[in-house]
Amino acid sequence: MILEAVNVTYEYPDGTRALKGVNFNVEKGQVVALLGPNGAGKSTLFLHFNGILKPKRGQIRVEGEPIQYTKEGLMKVRQKVGIVFQNPDDQLFAPTVKEDVAFGPFNIGLEVEEIERRVKDSLRKVGMLGFEDKPPHHLSGGEKKRVAIAGILAMNPQIMVLDEPTSGLDPRGASHIMRLLYKLNKEGMTIIIATHDVDMAPLYADKIYIISNGEIIKEGTPMEVFKDV
Ligand code: ADP
Ligand code: ADP
């Protein structure tokens, strides 16, 4: 198992019980979809996967190892697990696309040549070569999403976690993102997607979890999960 949430319970400081004993398993190379209505706990669970949030009870394991909530432990897990947030504006803040994608690799102290190579490779993968010097806020919604994905790819993570990756996009932009994720998965990336869009997930997922009110209420292959709907 490349990623596991074991009996994870989380409560926000105001007392909201956002996760109630969640178990969630992902195998290497899978596409796993987390479905559920707004407020169900999808983002809260994802924020546990790279240690942004720490479970009140339970454990998160990456490649079998529990996350260590120390500076070094968090740095390690963040190189393995990349999270693409729902709103790219939360993620894109550098003056140009190039600097934005370079931010992570720069932060972990890579050499300039390596940073440049990773920026170029990542932008090529998402189809955004040629946009290097543009300010991110001049891009369309779909383009911003792709740059946010490039920023995560530049860190060479093994697992990519995407919160509502197609929200706010037109059908063409959405299918562009889904095709990109499908391609990355074929190249070996493990992918976890949260969505409230029931139409899209069954097409791509090896496994589906349905979350409601902080609890996983169903899990299985798309066939198993949707057979009685
Ligand atoms: P989803 O991603 O499925 O829409 P969230 O994980 O964002 O759901 O939210 C789960 C629950 O936690 C909701 O009841 C939400 O209102 C609550 N919540 C989310 N963020 C916070 C926060 N920072 N403080 C308090 N409650 C929060
Ligand atoms: P939107 O941003 O409106 O959601 P897209 O992301 O599909 O839509 O495309 C946005 C812009 O990026 C368009 O001008 C399109 O021509 C261009 N584009 C789309 N795919 C590629 C690609 N693989 N390489 C270069 N440019 C692309």
Image (tube, grey):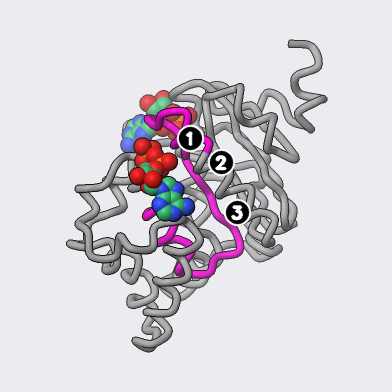
Whether residue 146 is visible? no
**First-in-chain label (2 vs 3):** 3
Kind of residue sitting beneath label 2: Met
Q: Which mark is residue 60?
A: 3
Per the model, the C-alpha gap separating discs 1 and 3 is 30 Å
Q: Nearer the viewer, residue 203 or 43?
A: 203
Per the model, the C-alpha gap separating discs 2 and 1 is 6 Å
The mark closer to the camera, 1 or 3, is 1
Q: In the displayed structure, does residue 187 sit left or right of residue 93?
A: right
Is 128 inside the magenta-drawn segment? no
Q: Residue at x 79, y 32 (%)?
A: 221
Q: Nearer the viewer, residue 215 or 89?
A: 89
Q: Position of residue 57 (x, y in %)?
A: 56, 45
**Image quadrant in which you'd find residue 194:** top right
Q: Residue at x 61, y 22 (%)?
A: 199
Q: Position of residue 96 (x, y in %)?
A: 22, 63
The correct choice, above or below, for 84 with respect to 172 in the image is below
Is 162 inside the magenta-drawn segment? yes
Where in the image, quadrant-wise, is ligand 1 located?
Answer: top left
Q: In the displayed structure, does residue 60 sit left or right of residue 84?
A: right
The residue wearing badge 2 is 178
The residue wearing badge 1 is 174
Kind of residue sitting beneath label 1: Ala
Mark 2 in CB contact with mark 3 (< 8 angstroms)? no
Please give the range of residues in magenta: 146-175
Q: Is mark 1 within 8 Å of ligand 2?
A: yes
